[in-house]
Image: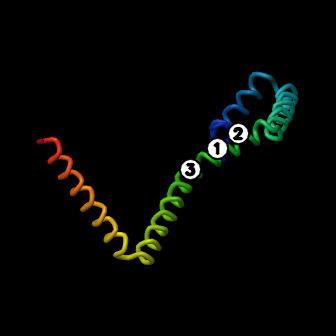
Amino acid sequence: MELFNIGILEFLFIIILAFIVLGPKQAVKIAGEVGAWIRDFLDSPMWKDIMKTSRDIRDIPRKITDDAEIQRALDGIDESIYGDKKNQVGDVERQEESESEKDGDFQDRS
Protein backbone atom coordinates (compact mmCIF):
# COMPACT_ATOMS: atom_id res chain seq x y z
CA MET A 1 0.00 0.00 0.00
CA GLU A 2 1.40 3.35 -1.00
CA LEU A 3 -0.35 6.66 -0.69
CA PHE A 4 1.52 9.74 -1.88
CA ASN A 5 4.53 7.46 -2.40
CA ILE A 6 4.76 6.67 1.33
CA GLY A 7 5.17 3.00 2.24
CA ILE A 8 3.94 1.24 5.38
CA LEU A 9 7.22 1.56 7.28
CA GLU A 10 7.43 5.29 6.61
CA PHE A 11 3.81 5.70 7.66
CA LEU A 12 4.43 3.84 10.94
CA PHE A 13 7.50 6.00 11.58
CA ILE A 14 5.43 9.16 11.09
CA ILE A 15 2.75 7.89 13.51
CA ILE A 16 5.30 7.02 16.19
CA LEU A 17 7.01 10.37 15.74
CA ALA A 18 3.65 12.17 16.03
CA PHE A 19 2.88 10.36 19.31
CA ILE A 20 6.26 11.35 20.71
CA VAL A 21 6.13 15.00 19.64
CA LEU A 22 2.43 15.79 20.10
CA GLY A 23 1.41 13.41 22.81
CA PRO A 24 -1.40 10.85 22.58
CA LYS A 25 -4.40 13.23 22.82
CA GLN A 26 -3.09 15.84 20.42
CA ALA A 27 -1.82 13.17 17.97
CA VAL A 28 -5.28 11.56 17.77
CA LYS A 29 -6.91 14.95 17.15
CA ILE A 30 -4.41 15.85 14.41
CA ALA A 31 -4.74 12.38 12.84
CA GLY A 32 -8.51 12.85 12.62
CA GLU A 33 -8.08 16.23 10.94
CA VAL A 34 -5.51 14.86 8.50
CA GLY A 35 -7.77 11.88 7.72
CA ALA A 36 -10.70 14.21 7.02
CA TRP A 37 -8.50 16.37 4.79
CA ILE A 38 -7.29 13.33 2.84
CA ARG A 39 -10.86 12.02 2.48
CA ASP A 40 -12.06 15.39 1.18
CA PHE A 41 -9.13 15.59 -1.21
CA LEU A 42 -9.72 12.08 -2.58
CA ASP A 43 -13.42 12.85 -3.10
CA SER A 44 -12.71 16.12 -4.90
CA PRO A 45 -13.28 16.52 -8.65
CA MET A 46 -9.67 17.63 -9.05
CA TRP A 47 -8.37 14.28 -7.72
CA LYS A 48 -10.78 12.38 -9.97
CA ASP A 49 -9.48 14.35 -12.98
CA ILE A 50 -5.90 13.59 -11.95
CA MET A 51 -6.65 9.87 -11.68
CA LYS A 52 -8.50 9.83 -15.03
CA THR A 53 -5.59 11.57 -16.73
CA SER A 54 -3.15 9.15 -15.10
CA ARG A 55 -5.15 6.16 -16.41
CA ASP A 56 -5.30 7.72 -19.88
CA ILE A 57 -1.53 8.23 -19.90
CA ARG A 58 -0.94 4.63 -18.81
CA ASP A 59 -3.29 3.43 -21.59
CA ILE A 60 -1.43 5.28 -24.37
CA PRO A 61 0.95 2.37 -25.17
CA ARG A 62 -1.99 -0.05 -25.32
CA LYS A 63 -3.93 2.27 -27.62
CA ILE A 64 -0.93 2.69 -29.91
CA THR A 65 -0.49 -1.09 -30.04
CA ASP A 66 -4.18 -1.58 -30.78
CA ASP A 67 -4.04 0.99 -33.58
CA ALA A 68 -0.97 -0.71 -35.05
CA GLU A 69 -2.73 -4.08 -34.93
CA ILE A 70 -5.80 -2.59 -36.64
CA GLN A 71 -3.58 -1.10 -39.35
CA ARG A 72 -1.86 -4.45 -39.90
CA ALA A 73 -5.24 -6.17 -40.12
CA LEU A 74 -6.46 -3.61 -42.67
CA ASP A 75 -3.28 -4.06 -44.69
CA GLY A 76 -3.80 -7.82 -44.60
CA ILE A 77 -7.41 -7.43 -45.74
CA ASP A 78 -6.37 -5.11 -48.57
CA GLU A 79 -3.69 -7.56 -49.64
CA SER A 80 -6.10 -10.48 -49.57
CA ILE A 81 -8.78 -8.56 -51.49
CA TYR A 82 -6.60 -6.86 -54.07
CA GLY A 83 -3.68 -9.26 -54.04
CA ASP A 84 -1.47 -8.68 -57.07
CA LYS A 85 -3.70 -5.95 -58.48
CA LYS A 86 -2.00 -3.34 -56.29
CA ASN A 87 1.42 -4.52 -57.40
CA GLN A 88 0.35 -4.42 -61.05
CA VAL A 89 -1.04 -0.90 -60.65
CA GLY A 90 2.17 0.20 -58.93
CA ASP A 91 4.28 -1.30 -61.73
CA VAL A 92 2.24 0.52 -64.39
CA GLU A 93 2.55 3.82 -62.52
CA ARG A 94 6.33 3.37 -62.18
CA GLN A 95 6.64 2.59 -65.90
CA GLU A 96 4.65 5.71 -66.78
CA GLU A 97 6.86 7.83 -64.50
CA SER A 98 10.05 6.45 -66.01
CA GLU A 99 8.74 7.08 -69.54
CA SER A 100 7.81 10.66 -68.67
CA GLU A 101 11.28 11.19 -67.18
CA LYS A 102 12.87 9.89 -70.39
CA ASP A 103 10.72 12.23 -72.45
CA GLY A 104 11.71 15.11 -70.17
CA ASP A 105 15.40 14.31 -70.57
CA PHE A 106 15.03 14.24 -74.35
CA GLN A 107 13.32 17.64 -74.40
CA ASP A 108 16.02 19.17 -72.17
CA ARG A 109 18.79 18.09 -74.55
CA SER A 110 17.34 19.79 -77.61
The CA span between labels 2 and 1 is 6 Å
Residue bearing the label numbered 3: 60
The CA span between labels 2 and 3 is 16 Å
Are dots 3 and 1 in contact, CB under 8 Å?
no
Residue type at numbered disc 1 = Ser
- Residue at image location 31% in from the left, 62% down from the top: 93
In the structure shown, which secondary structural element does the residue marked by tag 2 occupy? helix
> Which quadrant does the C terminus fall into?
top left
Give the class, few, some or many, for how many residues have Cα within 10 Å of label 3's Cα (few <14, many ≥20).
few
Image coordinates for residue 20, horizontal then vertical, percent: 74, 25
Image coordinates for residue 4, horizontal then vertical, percent: 67, 36
Answer above or below: position of 30 versus 52.
above
Are dots 2 and 1 in contact, CB under 8 Å?
yes
Image coordinates for residue 91, horizontal then vertical, percent: 28, 66
Select label 3 or label 1 by which is in front. Answer: 3
- Residue at image location 24% in from the left, 62% down from the top: 95
The CA span between labels 3 and 1 is 10 Å
Image coordinates for residue 105, horizontal then vertical, percent: 16, 46
Q: Does residue 14 appear to the left or right of 30 in the view shown?
A: left
Q: Does residue 102 appear to the left or right of 16 in the view shown?
A: left
Residue bearing the label numbered 2: 50
Residue type at numbered disc 2 = Ile
Are dots 2 and 3 in contact, CB under 8 Å?
no
Answer above or below: position of 32 versus 107.
above
- Residue at image location 80% in from the left, 35% down from the top: 41
Answer above or below: position of 13 versus 55.
above
Residue bearing the label numbered 1: 54
